[in-house]
Amino acid sequence: MASGLRLLIHLLLRTALRSGKEMLVVSINILGTVHKIFAISLMESLIFLLYLHDQLQLKIKTSH
């Protein structure tokens, strides 16, 4: 189950990076569902969101 979670997070990250900031909101909503399904802790959810935010910021900076 952990490898499935890693794959899902990887796909969420790739989608959000391709789509920009508006996709971050969708990713947060999906992550809430993932949190319920996989029972990951809120701390893990927060770490993922912070990582996703940092990656989006890097993409925005490098694209301009």
Image: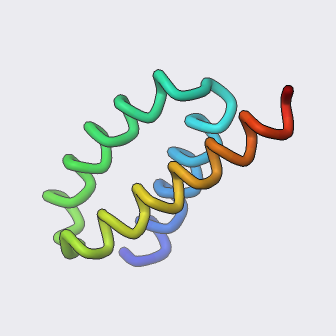
Number of labels in the image equals 0
Residue 44 drawn at (x, y percent)? 32, 73
Q: Position of residue 59 (x, y in %)?
A: 74, 40
Residue 25 relative to residue 40: left or right: right
The structure's colour scheme is: rainbow
Residue drawn at x 85%, y 30% is: 63
- Against 26, residue 30 (above or below) is below
Rendered image quadrant of residue 24: top left
Work out whether residue 48 or residue 50 is closer to the camera in this orientation and state it: 50
Q: On screen, 46 above or below 43?
A: above
- Quadrant where the N terminus sits is bottom left
Is residue 50 toward the left or the right of residue 38 in the image?
right
Occupied quadrant, residue 45:
bottom left
Q: Is residue 62 above or below residue 36?
A: above
Q: Nearer the viewer, residue 64 or 35?
A: 64
Q: Percent position (x, y) of residue 46?
A: 31, 64
**Quarter of the image where the C terminus is located:** top right
User: Going 43% across and 63% down the picture, which residue do you hit?
Assistant: 48
At 47% from the left edge and 54% from the top edge, which residue is drawn?
8
The residue sitting at 30% across, 49% down in the picture is: 31
How far across and down, in percent of the image, does residue 27 sit? 39, 39
Taking the image as shown, residue 13 lies to the left or right of residue 36, namely right
